[in-house]
Amino acid sequence: MGQAGWKGLFQSLFDYKTEKYVVAKNKKVGLLYRLLQLSILLYLVVWVFLVKKSYQDIDTSLQSAVVTKVKGVAYTNTTALGERLWDVADYVVPSQGENVFFVVTNLIVTPNQRQGTCAEREGIPDGMCSQDSDCRAGESVIAGHGVKTGHCLRVGNLTRGTCEIFAWCPLETQSRPTEPLLKEAENFTIFIKNFIRFPKFNFSKANVGQMDNRDFLKSCRFSSKNRYCPIFRLGSVVRWAGNDFQDMALEGGVIGIHIEWNCDLDKDASECNPHYYFNRLDNKHTTSVSSGYNFRFARYYRDPDGVEFRNLMKAYGIRFDVIVNGKAGKFSIIPTVINVGSGLALMGAGAFFCDLVLIYIIKKREFYRDKKYEEVRSYSFLPSGRENKTLKAEVEVEEMKQRTQEDDPPEEEEEGRREERTQAPLGSQGWERNGCVCQQHLGPARSGLQNMEVNVKQLPISRTVKT
């Protein structure tokens, strides 16, 4: 970069840019600008303020407590258990009534198990053996039922058998249920009591209505018209989740009970109501070797000799997860000002987009670009001496040219005026009514301008000749 380049770069550091407002008489760009303004205004009013309510301060730190109770009885008569009446203490786990609880709908019972030695079940890889050395004493069977004793048990002349183990014998029954044991569980009821609080606004509420009427909860059932009676029928909950209760009770599953609180605290507290919806959380359509929901538990006893034995039960059933979420909003000046400021910034973005269209896209873009961007020089930055006078004269000529072009009417208007002058009376051609000088006076002025331009251009030439 030469000396002149560095000098120009240094001088450009002291340039100052200021805005110049140009009114463009272009209907297309003007229409585009108004449409952008209208779109931004509709977005700000409809979406930001009416739909999203962005003028509110939001509290999402919901504090919630859930208490559940299940009621209902069922009667069964099976070979494994005989006649039996099932109540809440038998089929609800856990019994404390938390936000996650399990209702037993089916059972597989392995009765009278005692601790002793028996053969490991076939099909367990770590329990298969060909000789006693394959069953190291004291090792537990991986994914099995007990601890190896060191003996390999074979049936008949078979070369392979299973390891002998110390376990609860006989081993658990492997049969699968064909129909639910507690079919009557479909008519059991769930009472879900939910208390919520939004700490930012110190607002609290519960999903139970008419607290003073003790008989209200004994007779009511939840429906879309009775949202403050949180007593649900099990069969209805499963049906609302899109499933059949008898099919789900066979092998079990997981149901989600969602309680949502969306409260607008600018309105009355009675407008803040719970909304319920239900869905199945485990995917029944997924092909899996382990479908449904089950777990094992045992009931322990002692015989007359004091020897302990137990009844092992594999329980199938439906697990209910009560999930509470929500938010509360209340008017606040801070988010209101922030969103209004964002809307005004979007208005500026609309003007910027229209500027791009005006000076880069439309056909007359060069004309509008010249009008929008103008370079103005101060005389103080021009050279001194004879060159200073020459450059000043050139600048004055350029400025006079620009003013003349701005004052000159378009060609169509000029032709129209000429026709008017030719048709007008001779006496009216000298002076016009508005006080403008006649054409005879304008002619010499323009010719003088041209002569001035010629003289300025000749200055450097004459200087060269003298040298």
Image: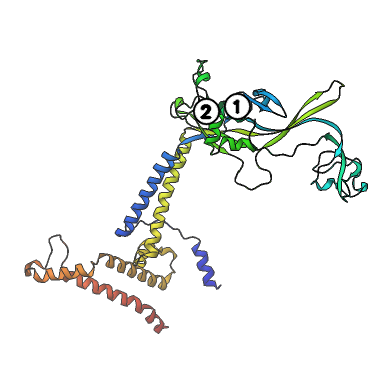
User: Which mark, by number, is residue 201?
Assistant: 2
Quadrant of the snapshot with the N terminus: bottom right
User: Which mark, by number, is residue 65?
Assistant: 1
> Do the residues bearing badges 1 and 2 touch, measured as CB atoms within 8 Å?
no
Quadrant of the snapshot with the C terminus: bottom left
Image side of residue 316 versus residue 130, left or right: left
Closer mark to the observer between disc 1 and disc 2: 1
Residue 232, percent from left and from top:
54, 28
Image side of residue 128 versus residue 14, left or right: right
The amino acid type of the residue labelled 2 equals Phe
> Which image quarter: residue 395?
bottom left
Image side of residue 112 versus residue 317, left or right: right
Which class describes the residues within 10 Å of circle 1: few (<14), some (14-19), or many (20+)? few
Residue, far bottom: 465
Residue 301 seen: yes
The amino acid type of the residue labelled 1 equals Ala
